[in-house]
């Protein structure tokens, strides 16, 4: 059933509009009742009962919206009422004024309802409402202090509904010089599915020429559903935009459908992951989304490279795997992650992310911890394994691994080792437990590093054997 919006109903407000619709639905039954009381006949009574039953059926089928909408069911009520009126009065008293008046009323109202039905189906009223809302936004003077706040305006939300069928009124707003007006128009077209030729290109041109990051981001989000490869590839260029907000919008708009788009955006994603200017963005994955198997394979290969690309590719895969585990704790998937972690030939950044994920969910078995103590593994993984094993009790291999890692000429690793030694072994190395580690370049960090390296070196001398055994 189509919903009609007319000027009279808008003046009455929602309650008045609903009351008028209820009145129109019950009008045929009321006409038959009046005729039955003034000109008793079984057909009129039967028709009135039929009308009431039909209204109850409409209410049951349409649910709570039956009082808010009119359409073909209302026309059926009027046509059947005319039928019962003709049987009750038209056949036996064709010249009766009551018959002619009732028939005229039903015909006029039914034609009006039919006209409104045609008007609603044509979209003319919806287009009129969209133009009125667009004009109201163009004339608006009191805008939120930040452009992002324009999205939450009631007029913008109403415009989003009004341009559902045709975005032309919103597209016309893009020609306005004020960024607030263009922002409102783009927010109303966010994630739009259907575009006529040339419309998506107009939105893209706004992104290309806008100086405001919010406007560029809104334009990208408006085109998030485009299915044209050329447009998608041009949107992918914004993965390296100068604004972090625009880069986030491009990630959300492009990577939500990697099953179809990955080959189109793969080169741009690789460049963005390796761009040092985008390093602060962290993982490149849309909120709540998963990556395709093809994207996972590429990211796994990129995690084995050097620099920023390896780190961000590993972070992205970490988020992907975490969401997979949150959806379903599949034993095969968990075993696959454990195998990747245990593989010494796998990329170190990826292994670190997998270790963090499995450790958080208590999915690291003891035998895997002991494998990670091996010198073939990176120092951070050896520290994770050593701490986990010492948390369960005494473990000679874990202590040995800590001593070996403590000798490495890396102050950051030395601080992490010292924290574990002091917390798990009870050796005071100058750290305040429960507090963040000191800055790497600080005097305290230098002192802690010297102490932990001394602890690791002294343990090799015979006079310290008894202490090691006690540990």
Image (cartoon, grey):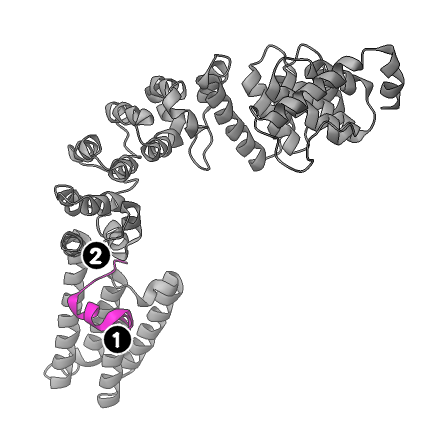
Q: How far apart are marks 2 and 1 (CA)?
A: 40 Å
Per the rendered image, the range of residues in magenta is: 1-24
Query: Which residue appears at 9% of the width and 83% of the height?
Result: 95
Left/right of residue 446 with respect to residue 150 in the rendered view: right
Q: Quadrant of residue 226?
A: top left
Of residue 315 and residue 73, the one placed in the foreground of this image is 315
Q: Which residue lies furthest to the left in this view?
A: 95
Placement of the N terminus among the 4 image quadrants: bottom left
**Left or right: 364 in relation to 160:** right
Q: Quadrant of residue 223?
A: top left
Q: Are marks 2 and 1 in contact (CB under 8 Å)?
A: no
> Residue at 13% across / 81% down in the picture?
101
Across and down, in percent, residue 239 comes to 33, 26
User: Which residue does the numbered mark 2 point to in the structure image?
Assistant: 142
In the displayed structure image, the side of residue 186 where residue 63 appears, left or right: right
Residue 428, x across and y down, in percent: 76, 29
Quadrant hosting residue 125? bottom left
Residue 343, label in figure? none
The one nearer the camera, 57 or 261, is 261
Question: Magenta region's main secondary structure?
Answer: helix
In depth, the one of 244 and 155 nearer the eye is: 244
Please identify the quadrant where the C terminus is shown: top right
Q: Nearer the viewer, mark 2 or mark 1?
A: 2
Callout 1: SS: helix
Secondary structure, mark 2, is: loop
Going by the picture, which residue comes out furthest to the bottom?
38
Answer whether residue 211 is visible to the viewer in this image.
yes
Relative to 409, is 356 above or below? below
Q: Name the residue under label 1.
A: 23
Crowd band around label 1 with a 10 angstrom C-alpha radius: few (<14), some (14–19), many (20+): few
Q: List x then y, in percent, for residue 104.
A: 12, 76
> Which residue in the rendered view is the most extreme toward the front?
443
């Amino acid at each position: 059933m189509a919903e009609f919006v007319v000027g009279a109903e808008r003046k009455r407000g929602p309650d008045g509009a609903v009351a008028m619709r209820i009145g129109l639905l019950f009008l045929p039954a009321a006409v038959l009742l009046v005729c039955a009381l003034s000109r008793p006949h079984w057909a009129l009574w039967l028709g009135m009962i039929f009308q009431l039953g039909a209204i109850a059926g409409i209410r049951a089928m349409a649910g709570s919206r039956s009082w808010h909408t009119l359409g073909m069911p209302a026309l059926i009520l009027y046509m059947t009422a005319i039928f019962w009126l003709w049987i009750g009065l038209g056949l036996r008293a064709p010249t009766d004024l009551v018959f002619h008046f009732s028939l005229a009323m039903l015909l006029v109202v039914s034609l009006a309802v039919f006209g409104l039905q045609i008007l609603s189906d044509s979209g003319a009223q919806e287009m009129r409402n969209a133009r009125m809302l667009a004009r109201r936004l163009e004339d608006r003077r009191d805008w939120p202090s930040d452009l992002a706040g324009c999205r939450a305006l009631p007029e913008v939300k109403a415009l989003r509904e009004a341009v559902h069928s045709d975005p032309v009124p919103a597209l016309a707003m893009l020609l306005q010089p004020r960024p607030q007006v263009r922002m409102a128009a783009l927010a109303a077209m966010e994630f739009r599915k259907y575009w006529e030729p040339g419309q998506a290109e107009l939105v893209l041109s706004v992104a290309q020429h806008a100086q405001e990051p919010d406007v560029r981001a809104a334009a990208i989000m408006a085109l998030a559903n485009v299915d044209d490869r050329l447009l998608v590839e041009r949107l992918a260029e914004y993965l390296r935009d100068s604004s972090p907000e625009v880069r986030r919008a491009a990630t959300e708009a492009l990577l939500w459908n990697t099953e179809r788009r990955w080959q189109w955006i793969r080169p741009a994603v690789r460049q963005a992951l390796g761009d040092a200017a985008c390093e602060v963005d962290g993982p490149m994955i849309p909120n709540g989304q998963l990556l395709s198997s093809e994207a996972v394979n590429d990211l796994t290969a990129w995690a084995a490279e050097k620099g920023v690309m390896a780190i961000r590719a590993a972070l992205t895969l970490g988020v992907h795997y975490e969401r997979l585990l949150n959806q379903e704790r599949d034993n095969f998937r968990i075993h696959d992650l454990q195998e990747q972690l245990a593989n010494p030939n796998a990329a170190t950044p990826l292994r670190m992310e997998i270790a963090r994920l499995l450790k958080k969910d208590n999915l690291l078995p003891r035998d895997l911890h002991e494998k990670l103590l091996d010198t073939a593994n990176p120092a951070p993984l050896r520290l994770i394994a050593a701490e986990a094993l010492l948390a369960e009790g005494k473990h000679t291999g874990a202590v040995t691994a800590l001593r070996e890692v403590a000798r490495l000429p890396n102050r950051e690793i030395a601080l992490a080792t010292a924290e574990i030694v002091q917390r798990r072994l009870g050796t005071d190395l100058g750290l305040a437990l429960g507090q963040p580690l000191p800055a790497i370049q600080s005097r305290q960090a230098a002192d802690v590093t010297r102490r932990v390296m001394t602890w690791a070196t002294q343990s090799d001398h015979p006079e310290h054997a008894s202490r090691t055994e006690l540990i």
